[in-house]
Image: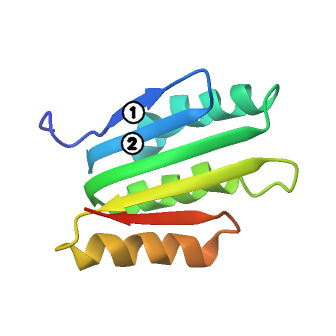
Amino acid sequence: MNEFSEPTINFDDNGSISISGISMMEDAMDFYQPTKDWIDNFLSSNKSITIDFNLNYFNSSSAKQFIQILSKLEDDKIDGKVIWNYPNDHIIMFDRGKELEAILNVPFEFIGS
């Protein structure tokens, strides 16, 4: 596995998570487990969270993990939001965000750059 196959993930105490880069690892479930744990812990005492994606590529096993992560924001008691950044010339990344938006009950904001 090369060093560029795992995204950079940053958390802050205000309820923002950023996931950026390329998400193409062999075991996405293990890689994203700490992120899911952090969200669960954060939401146990907070009700507002934003997940900011800025990815160049992600594989299908990462997409499955994104669905699990974002489904944690579907609770009516949680003010959850997704910011989906994509390059204007990369329609596939825009479409992949739209696919996630279509299957989840979480507000998405799309930002082209």
Q: Front-most of 92 and 47?
A: 47
Name the quarter where the N terminus is drawn: top left
- Secondary structure category for the residue under label 2: strand
Residue at the (43%, 39%) spot, across then down: 18
105 w.r.t. 102: above or below:
above
Q: Position of residue 10 (x, y in %)?
A: 42, 28
Q: Which mark is residue 19?
A: 2
Residue 43, image quadrant: top right
Percent from the top left, x then y, of residue 69? 59, 49
Q: Which element carries disc 1, helix, strand or loop?
A: strand
Amino acid carrying mark 1 in the image: Ile
Outermost residue on the right side: it is 77
Quarter of image, res 62: bottom left
- Is mark 1 in CB contact (under 8 Å) with mark 2? yes
Residue highlighted by disc 1: 9
Q: Can you tell which quarter of the image residue 16 is in?
A: top right
Nearer to the camera, 112 or 62: 112
Decide if residue 78 is on the left or right side of residue 100.
right
Residue 49: image location, x then y, percent = 65, 40
